[in-house]
Amino acid sequence: MNYIGCHFVLIPVEPWTDLLINELGDLGFESFLNTENGVSAFIKEEDWSENLLNQIELKQNDMVSISHHTEFIKEENWNAVWESSFDPICVSNRCTIRAPFHPPSASEIEIVINPKMSFGTGHHQTTHMMIQLMLDVSIEGCRVLDMGCGTGILAILAHKRAAESVTAIDIDEWCYNNTLENIEVNGCPSIKVMMGGASLLGSQKYDLVIANINRIVLLNDLERYVSVLASGGYVLLSGFYNEDVFLIREKAEHLGLQFVENIELDNWVAIKFLY
């Protein structure tokens, strides 16, 4: 199967890259690679049309400049594109995330993720920081909820750290299916995967709630997350910038959460709260 690669340059890069990826996903692009100047997006040749790019609403925003060039990628070159684009990463010298074509590592924890989207491989700053925070929290025997699970990487990490149960939820069908694929690859069949949003949450309580989503969703759904959090449980949040921390903390503390710590990477922030 042949692909078309669209290589986008954004000025400025942030916070517009993630917004562009969201739009491209809705247009049928199925794979993404964050670059120094923006993002590369890939779509099957049969689904491609130049008119697709005219539907990008973000191009009408005067706050960001978007340019691009396209590339035709033959089927036999597809794996080579990904293998040249992705390197394994190791977080806190304890957890290695690699693709299936990488050799096994000697890390304490190893997670194999099919590299269909760089955000889900741990290369994105927010995923990297969420893994850092999870490695510092005792998860053994905990009931874990992963909201906005993406590729399932954080849910898989919770399972590998001996969580009693793990529930992974995402509103996007691609993420739902990719999570199912990755939990099978990693031998984590007990992870419960659901497609939808916070409305799926019922009366079950969780000891750890993790949510790596954007600021708007977090502020809107945080009250629902807290409603299913057990006393003494933790909430780990990321997906927002340093300038958003005040709003996130204000909302969280209003709901009874206690700020514990935050970490920052390239202006992205992840925060740990105690209930």
Image (cartoon, helix red, strand yellow):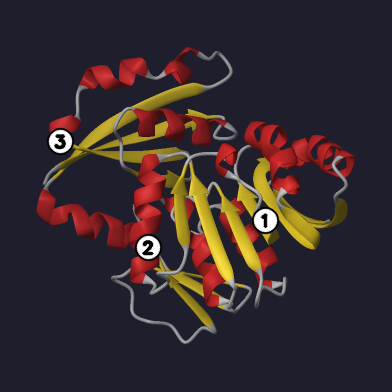
Tell me the number on the disc at residue 45.
3
CA distance for labels 1 and 3: 39 Å
- The answer to whether 159 appears left or right of 47 in the picture is right
Sort mark 2 into few (<14), some (14-19) or many (20+) by Cα contacts within 10 Å: many
Looking at numbered disc 3 in the image, what kind of residue is underneath it?
A: Glu
**Foreground disc of the pair 1, 3:** 1
Report the residue marked by disc 1: 209
155 versus 225 height, above or below: below
The residue lying toward the viewer, choosing from 106 and 216, is 216
**Foreground disc of the pair 3, 2:** 2
Q: Quadrant of the C terminus?
A: bottom right
**Foreground disc of the pair 1, 2:** 1
Residue 220 quadrant: top right
Q: Secondary structure at mark 3?
A: helix
Q: Is residue 114 visible?
A: no
Residue at screen point 69% across, 64% down: 133
Q: Position of residue 235 (x, y in %)?
A: 73, 55
CA distance for labels 3 and 2: 25 Å
